[in-house]
Image (cartoon, helix red, strand yellow):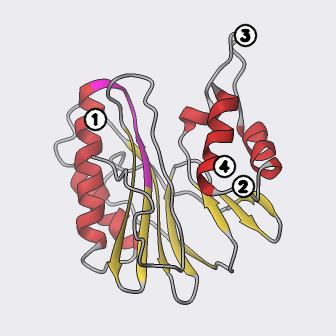
Amino acid sequence: YLPSIFPPFPDIKQFDLYASMNPAKEVGGDFYDFFMIDDSHVAIVIGDVSGKGVPAALFMVTTKTLIKDHAQMGLHPAEVFTKVNNILCEGNDAGLFVTGWMAVININTGVMTYVNAGHNLPLLFHEGKFSPLVSKPGFVLAGLESMTYKENKIELKQGDRILLYTDGITEATNIDKKLYGEDRLLELLNKNKYSELVELYKSQLDLIL
């Protein structure tokens, strides 16, 4: 189950969210999530399980649940990924792994603490343009026990935006088998940078499809 009601928190005015997933098959391993940890902090998560089909979907559900459960304990994002990674490594007979990115945002101060486990870099809209939110990614989740993840912090300003995505966008191909690519995604976003969230999503989806 992925959140699908928007706006998700109509009584909270400090931020807005929109998300959607269009799987290549009936079931898959991509996922996203967002939830309030307390009155001042929202968590946002995106991930991509290796493989396709039912095994990936089941692993996705487990990963998503573990991340949310640990985040709601009040752990910082790096602590969440460190603990979840160790749990996922236990009994991972199928050899699956997960790329993931998670942030906790203080909606009153704009401070965002985030961690990356081998996932695509988010694209941050700041000071009039979208650009990659660069950080040194950690190793994928479920890939190796006893990994320690490190987190980064930035202060978001009013009007800033963050786009999270999986490689389902950047690795989409046209009839000539040419990859869509990160450069084209970035170009498209900057052409539509002042669009409403739903329209911004539709603009990239329509062009890719």
Residue at numbered disc 3: 176
Evaluate if marks 3 and 1 touch, with contact meaning CB atoms under 8 Å apart: no
Residue 71 x %, y %: 31, 71
Decide if residue 105 is on the left or right side of residue 86.
Answer: right
Residue denoted by label 1: 57
The amino acid type of the residue labelled 4 equals Leu
Q: Nearer the viewer, mark 3 or mark 4?
A: 4
The amino acid at mark 1 is Ala
Drawn side of residue 71 relative to residue 150, left or right:
left
Residue at image coords 55%, 77%: 112
Q: Which mark is residue 195?
A: 2
Q: Are marks 2 and 1 in contact (CB under 8 Å)?
A: no
How packed mark 3 is, by other alpha carbons closer than 10 Å (few <14, some 14-19, many 20 or more), is few
How many marks are shown on the rendered structure?
4
Q: CA distance from mark 3 to mark 4?
A: 26 Å
- In this rendering, which labeled residue sits more in front, label 2 or label 1? 2
**Spatial CA span between label 4 and label 2:** 5 Å
Query: Badge 4: few (under 14), some or many (20 or more) residues near its Cα, within 10 Å?
Result: some
Q: State whether residue 199 is above or below residue 42.
A: above
Q: Verify CB contact (< 8 Å) between mark 3 and mark 4.
A: no
Under tag 2, what secondary structure? loop
Q: Which residues are magenta?
A: 46-53
Mark 4 = which residue?
200
**Magenta stretch: residue 26 in it?**
no
Q: Position of residue 205 (x, y in %)?
A: 62, 35
The single residue placed furthest to the top in the displayed view is 176
Task: Determine which of the numbered discs, if any, sits on residue 134 in the image.
Answer: none
Q: Nearer the viewer, residue 94 or 146?
A: 94
Q: Secondary structure at mark 3?
A: loop
User: Which of the two residues, 194 or 83, is positioned nearer the viewer here?
Assistant: 194
Q: Is residue 51 magenta?
A: yes
Q: Earlier in the sequence, mark 3 or mark 4?
A: 3
